[in-house]
Image (cartoon, rainbow, N blue to C red):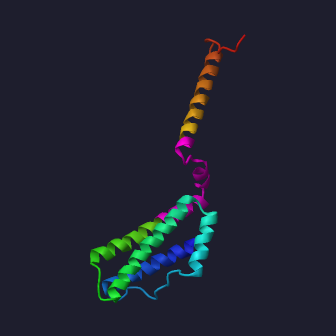
Amino acid sequence: MVADHVARVRAWANIAVDEAKGEPPRFSPKPELSAGDEWYQMSARLRVFGSLIARVQFDHMHSASSTLLLLVRRYENGNPATPEEVDAAFQLVHLMASRLTIVLTAELGPLSDELKDSPKHRWQIREKKNQQKKFEARNRLMSQGEDGGEQPPDGS
């Protein structure tokens, strides 16, 4: 559902950029952006089942598409934006859509385990480093015992 929406946003942006500049559209027909119940349903599903990264990227994509929509409406009201503003908004929509696609692909594909296992908070990163240090110290002690070096103190 989200992937379909991302494709629709990209297709919509390709036409909206021409409308915001007052040029004839290069593509047709113009797909409608999701609005109302459909958008809220998709947003709710993503908030329940998606990761924080996916939710944030989804919101960024919608924010960027809203900016482009405002530029289209400004042109319709006789107050057009500069072509640089329109191009920047258009590029931002595609950038955010690409990032959301990458996040969804990573979550659903082979990188899913990597994302789930990776530490996300500072304390988790610190704990993972401490575990690694303990593991390395234990291996050093065990290898010293096997090499005939000093035996680790075991209290006897």
**Relative image position of residue 28 (x, y in whole percent):** 44, 88
Quadrant of image for the N terminus: bottom right
| 61 in relation to 147, above or below | below
Which one is in front, 86 or 35? 35
From which residue to which does the magenta span run? 99-124
Left or right of 54 on screen, residue 156? right
Characterize the magenta stretch by its predominant secondary structure: helix
Residue drawn at (60%, 29%) of the image: 134
Q: Is residue 97 visible?
A: no
Q: What is the number of callouts on the image?
A: 0
Residue drawn at (61%, 70%) of the image: 44
Residue drawn at (55%, 36%) of the image: 129
| 132 in relation to 137, above or below | below
Quadrant of image for the C terminus: top right
**Relative image position of residue 80 (x, y in whole percent):** 29, 83
Which one is in front, 70 or 61? 70
Q: Is residue 25 visible?
A: yes
**Relative image position of residue 102 (x, y in whole percent):** 51, 62
